[in-house]
Amino acid sequence: MRRTHALVMTTALALGLVSQARAQVEVGVKAGLTFATISESNLSPNFENKTGFAAGVHFGFPLGSNFMLQPEALLTQQGAGFTVPGGSGEIHLTYLQVPLNLRINFGNGSVRPFILAGPYAAFRLSCDIGDLFDSDCDNDISSTDWGLDFGGGIRFNKFFLEARYNLGLKDVSDLEQGFDSKQRVFMVMLGFAF
């Protein structure tokens, strides 16, 4: 129910923003890879990187000649690999991530570098620990995440290449053993802006 509510609210927000400023807003689509892990301060062994996929849309609202407010809706695959006595496995997490970035564009030609930064909120859509544990992932990992999103890229006319890092600030572990688990995700995406 919470997932559906979050998806409906995000879609309504996106459609409202587009209809409000259709003539001035930049709409972009993007897709790429995620390289994710979970930072764990009280667990040995440490988690390993897991590669996934990300795709979504962004809306750029001009705030002057070189500044834009850029809300986004991204579907991201995250999680981590792990090795424990008795085997290894992966935590598979899928999120609807909603960053709200300030983007600064440099230059004014057809090739323009940019940087972006801002907060994000993420709503878990699915979770799977695999066959190694008889654990219900829904009870072990929080249904929400939030943190900071920052990165940069370069635009070639309407095409762009972007790299960003998500620094999770929320403990996503719902276990009671005192774990402090935070998402760490590096993304590389290609996109097209309309």
Image (spheres, rainbow, N blue to C red):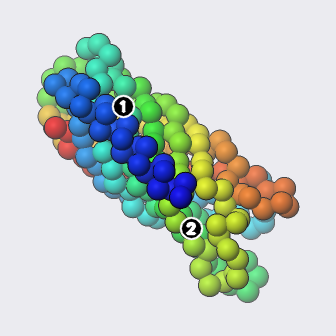
x and y percentages locating residue 87 in the rendered image: 68, 84
Any mark on residue 133, and which?
A: none
**Badge count:** 2
Q: Name the residue under label 2.
A: 127
What residue occupies the far right of the structure in this picture? 177
Q: Which residue is drawn at the image coordinates 50% and 61% (left, top)? A: 125
Task: Mark 2 or mark 1: name the one nearer the start of the chain.
Answer: 1
Left or right: 85 as drawn, with respect to 20: right
x and y percentages locating residue 120 in the rendered image: 51, 39
**Residue sitting nearer the eye, 8 or 184:** 8
Q: Which residue is drawn at the image coordinates 76% and 52% (left, top)? A: 180
Any mark on residue 70, and which?
A: 1
| Image vertical order of residue 18 relative to residue 80, above or below | above
Q: Quadrant of residue 146?
A: top right
- Amino acid type, mark 1: Gln
Q: Which residue is drawn at the image coordinates 41% and 43% (left, top)? A: 10
